[in-house]
Image: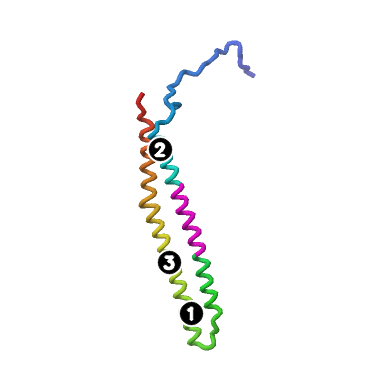
Amino acid sequence: MNAIDLTKAKEAKPEEYDNSFSKAPTFLSQAGFKLAKITLLIISGVILFAMVFIVVKQFSADSAFGELSRLPATDDATLERKLQLYKLAQEEAKNYRDFIVQFLQMILLNLLLPILTAILGYIFGTSGNTKE
């Protein structure tokens, strides 16, 4: 077996690197970072609100179906009317859920995401152009 001879090894030292990355961030980059954090918090809040709102609305729609199921179906006309009410309640719940999803999608994708992209673009664009 070949063994490594450590007596002939030379000491190696790392080269000195530019310490430009260790400089303190400027006020503008700190402000941009804080704006990005606030925008991310707003986006998270909107998503959390949407999830809670849809779940709560779903439970309220389920209670409407429960009330419909308690109605007595004594003859065919009443049963047919009950089925129509079920379909209408189901359609209303679906339309409302679709409206909320489209509205939140519009807010998130057309408003908040471009703002976040612009802020992050500013932060990373100006961090490389620091003047000494």
Residue at the spot of label 2: 31
The Cα atoms of the two marked residues, 2 and 1, are separated by 58 Å
Mark nearest the camera among 1 and 3 is 3
Report the quarter where the C terminus lies: top left
How many neighbours does mark 3 have within 10 angstroms: few (below 14), some (14-19), or many (20 or more)? Answer: some
Mark nearest the camera among 3 and 2 is 2
Residue at the spot of label 1: 83
Residue 5, image x and y in percent?
61, 14
113 on left or right of 74: left
Q: What secondary structure predominates along the stretch shown in magenta?
A: helix
Q: Say which amino acid is labelled 2.
A: Ala
The Cα atoms of the two marked residues, 1 and 3, are separated by 20 Å
Residue 12, image x and y in percent?
53, 15
Residue at the spot of label 3: 96
Q: Of marks 1 and 3, which one's residue comes earlier in the chain?
A: 1
Q: Say which amino acid is labelled 1.
A: Leu
The Cα atoms of the two marked residues, 3 and 2, are separated by 39 Å
- Tag 2–tag 1 contact (CB < 8 Å): no
Looking at the rendered structure, the secondary structure element under dot 1 is helix
Q: Say which amino acid is labelled 3.
A: Tyr
Q: Of marks 3 and 2, which one's residue comes earlier in the chain?
A: 2
Examine the image and state in which quarter residue 34 appears. Answer: top left
Looking at the rendered structure, the secondary structure element under dot 2 is helix
Q: Of marks 2 and 1, which one's residue comes earlier in the chain?
A: 2
Numbered range of the magenta stretch: 41-56
